[in-house]
Image: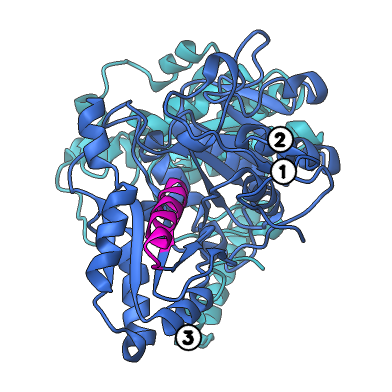
Amino acid sequence: MSMPSDVVLETQRTLTMVEALREALVEEMRRDERVILLGEDIGVPGGFGGAFTVTLGLEQEFGHDRVLDTPISEAAIAGVAAGAAMGGLIPVADVQYGDFLFIAMDQLANQAAKMRYMSGGQITVPMVFRAPVGATTRGAQHGQSLESFLMHVPGLKVACPSNPYDGKGLLKTAIRDPNPVIFFEHKLLYGSKGARKEAGGLQLITHVPAEEYLIPFGKARIVHQGTRATIVASLLMVHKSMQASKLLRDEGIDVEVIDIRTLVPLDQETIFASVRKTGRLVIAEEDNLTGGWGAEVAAIVADACLGYLEAPIRRVAAPNTPVPFAPVMENYYVPSAEKIITAVRSVL
Amino acid sequence: MHLGNLLEGMLPAVAIVGGAIPLASGLGLAMKYRKTGNIVACFFGDGATNIGSFHEGVNIAAIWDLPVVFVCENNRYGASTAIERVTRVAHLSDRAAAYGIPGFTVDGNDVEAVLEATSEAAERAHNGKGPTFLELETYRFCGHSRSDPGHYRPKEEVQYWKKRDPIVRYETFCLAEGLLSAKEIDELKKSVEEQLDQAVAFAEASPSPHPEDCLNDVYAV
């Protein structure tokens, strides 16, 4: 299996995250007619294919029986997806902004996540729920990162791709998983083009093979190998951590950067092996600090690798406030490469 | 708590009020898409008609003509709260108009009336005509739970409804119509009681699960 790389060869086929996710949907819908899409502002002729164009034009190939535009009813989107999954379909549902997951939480956390358990394993709920996250000058109710909330619910799986290559491979795996998967996409990583182009988005394209590939859940990726400290990150923070690692490399400090890829299941072994090698751990997450997934990673590392740690574990996260609206405040709020560098220096 | 019998097409009961309504619409979507010829019957109480999942779930079944029958058993109380205290419409079936679907209020303690209304609703669902909302007016003779003596209900009201016990009424109907003899009714009652006794005996004789089995069935593999 080829891997994403910072270096894209001229001869290689490249895609943005939006294009890679769309390709995953198309491939899976062609492969299996049980796969349907439902979400807000999808499948509308002349519309925009969901908030970030991922589903643009798919109704032309698959028709309105398989690309279902829903009312603004997040509880029903999640509940209908769960019910349809129980009834033999594989729904890929989406909301415009991850913040709206709070409206859908009963259906996700009480129904979809627990139906298998409550039925003694007789019912499965093979659904995917896509949700854009990340602070992008939209403020407190359109810019949150909800991975930690969903990670806490037994019965749900949580994926969070940081690049187009992973986006395609992980989304295809999510669709084939027999469990409900919450699939987080970062708005600044979409690389969308045209009218829906995201201000401040990364110019992110990676090699994405046209042929089929799957990326298994629970396998983190070592984005950069290093020996002095380990940085564990997800989504946008992978890129900020790579910026930090490049700047540190200029000073001769080589840090290892791990992209967590899926929070549930969590690839403990890759993290443990890295910490046993470097003896130092910094965790970079975009959400506010308290009760975040970084606390979980810190706890399991303290439990399993205490004897290898040569410094306290540091978490780089947002302050415990809602996401602020003013761009200068948001810039202060979202963890930066500089803050990650400061944290790394503090453990060296 | 989550009783179900998948062999009979009965899903585990959902213990969040109204929580099964969007699931029912989703099951209806799967049946329609897969052309299985099945329909969904979704049961809930009067209290569920004031929760958002009711509105969202019924609306989506309406706009997509899903084969679902929404059956509201209006027993007049959500736990201890009388429906009049929390709902302004005269009949809960009035709400069907808001979704553009047929809605009917039916004497829920009249077996024949319930059969007729549900048959019509099921036929509509089978014929691609979308969902129906049925309000079955009924009552509970006991409290909401084991610890509830039901003191919030007027004695006259309880008496009024006890005289309308659906089982007694149907017995009377069957006798009057010559559908069943008194002897047959007695035999039927005995056989039901026997089944119940056997079920209780089976449950009591069954061993408790292994504690560590609580770790199973969280994820499918």
Residue A180 at x, y percent in the picture: 57, 52
Q: Are marks 1 and 3 in contact (CB under 8 Å)?
A: no
Residue that numbered label 1 is attached to: A89
Residue B108 position in % (x across, y down): 47, 33
Name the chain under label 3.
Answer: B
In the rendered image of the structure, the colour used to display chain A is blue
Same chain assignment for discs 1 and 3: no
Amino acid on which disc 2 is placed: Ile
Three-letter code for the amino acid on which mark 1 is drawn:
Leu
**Mark nearer the N terminus (2 vs 1):** 2
Q: Is residue A22 left or right of residue A139?
A: right
SS at mark 3?
helix
Residue extent of the magenta highlight: A232-253
* Residue B113, placed above or below residue A112: above
- Majority secondary structure in the magenta region: helix
Question: Do the residues indicated by labels 2 and 1 lie within the same chain of the protein?
Answer: yes
Which color has been applied to chain B in this rendered view? Answer: cyan
Res B179 quadrant in image = top right
Residue farthest along the top direction in this orientation? A46
- Residue A168 against residue B115 in the figure, above or below: below
Q: Which residue is mark 2?
A: A36
Chain that bears disc 2: A
In the rendered structure, the answer to whether residue B34 lies left or right of residue A306 reads right
The answer for which chain carries disc 1 is A
Q: Give yes or no for residue A243 being in the magenta stretch.
A: yes
